[in-house]
Image (spheres, grey):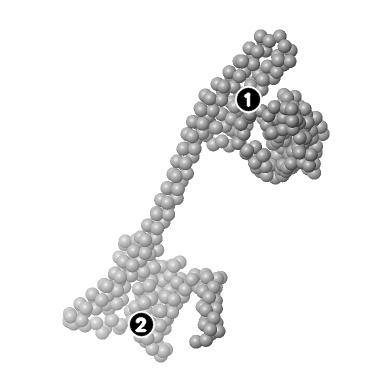
Amino acid sequence: MSVRGGRLLARGTAAGRAFVRGKWGRRLRRIAPVVVPVLLAIADAVLVNGLKMALELGVSVVAAAALLLRRRFPLLVFLFTLPGLYIGYIWFAPMIGLYTLAARRPGRVRLGICAVLLIAAHFLPYPISDFELTAYRENTLVLIDACVTSAAPIALGLLVRTRRELASRVEDLTRSLRREDRLLADRVKTTERARLAREMHDVVAHQVSLISLQAGAVQVSTADEAARAGARTIRELSVRTLEELRHMVGVLRAEDGGQEARELAPQPDLEELPRLIEMSALDVTYEGGVVAGASGAKTVERAAFRTVQEALTNVRKHAPGAQVRVRVDPADAGLRVEIRNGPPDAAATVPALPGGGHGLVGLRERAQSLGGTLEARRTSDGGFVVRAEFPYGAG
């Protein structure tokens, strides 16, 4: 075979496999179990009775054609096949009918009666006048053959039905095990969430409470007005931190962490933005072009607040002494937030504040979850800009 011929043969084989896997292949797999038994029964009728039009061939063909309805009416179809066995001496049609009855309607009494009917149709000759009662050996062999012919399709049908039921039970058991695994994972997650909540409360709340107490002591004991104002700010920030910590602990302790858990305490919005800027201890110019609560989209306002809060924290960490401008303007059916800072002051002391480098990543994920965008980049003058847009429809 040439190379070209081999390629054509490979393409033909691939096309054949694609045909079997395609729409026509699916139709063929659906039709074949219905049509093939009928064709086998017709072939059995023709081989036994020939093509001569007679009563035997007619009854046998009717019995074979009845197999088309064997899945919907298994008992009735089996009864239609018995004359084909009794008169036309065909085997395939009644055996297939009895198999279908055992697989779909496995009643003991029903199967017992149908088995006796098949044995009788097989054992008794047509016409009945040809029956010889004294032929003991021949009658015994025919009776054994009839019993085997009756028992085999019943056993196979019951086996197929049992296998189908076992497969269904295994599938149900698998789904149940998966559901139990999910419940166990949720239980472990809830337990771990409660443990983290306890540790957060024990460690962080204790430290923040000490900070608040120390700030209160400085506020009372010092005579310096600037130090007193700073201590007051520290104490207010400590109280706010404890409130947010209490809210987060409630979320962690909630069983499902859903919407109800997220709404345990009021969340900051644009109304709190001036206060946040005032307590940031930075040189901030605030340009607010949106009235808080005017849009009714509290989720968007909370996202804007958190964006400004994280940006100011980054300025405090990485650009101390820099001038900052915060703008909140209405955008196209949404809200635009921009925080721009200049280069850091070389004379300012860089605070040793811890950071994980995930703040902007979290802000970008929050913006994307609301259907918005977030841009963070350096500017040509050595500063940094964070710009976010949030659509009101997401809130």
The image quarter in which residue 157 lies: bottom left
Identify the residue position indicated by label 1 in the image. 241
**Image height of 262 relative to 24, above or below:** above
- Residue 269 appears in the picture as rendered: no
Dot placed on the residue nearer the N-terminal end, 1 or 2: 2
* Residue depicted at x 79% and y 33%: 325
Horizontal side of residue 155 vs 269, given as left or right:
left
Residue 367, image x and y in percent?
69, 42
Query: Does dot 1 land on a helix, a strand or a loop?
Result: helix
Please rate how many residues cluster around mark 2, counting C-alpha atoms within 10 Å: few if below 14, some from 14 to 19, many from 20. Answer: many
Mark carried by residue 88: 2
Residue type, mark 1 in image: Thr
Residue 123, image x and y in percent?
27, 77
Query: Does dot 2 land on a helix, a strand or a loop?
Result: helix
- Residue 125 appears in the picture as rendered: yes
Residue 388, image x and y in percent?
74, 41
Residue type, mark 2 in image: Gly
**Image height of 124 relative to 374, above or below:** below
Number of marks drawn: 2
Residue 298, image x and y in percent?
71, 34
**Image height of 338 relative to 197, above or below:** below
Q: Residue lying furthest front in this view?
A: 347
* Nearest to the observer: residue 235 or residue 88: 235
The image quarter in which residue 213 lies: top right
* Residue depicted at x 45% and y 66%: 72
Q: Nearer the viewer, mark 1 or mark 2?
A: 1
* Residue depicted at x 30% and y 83%: 127
* Nearest to the observer: residue 18 or residue 161: 18
* Nearest to the observer: residue 258 or residue 318: 318
Work out which quarter of the rendered image holds the C terminus and state it. top right
* Residue depicted at x 49% and y 31%: 195
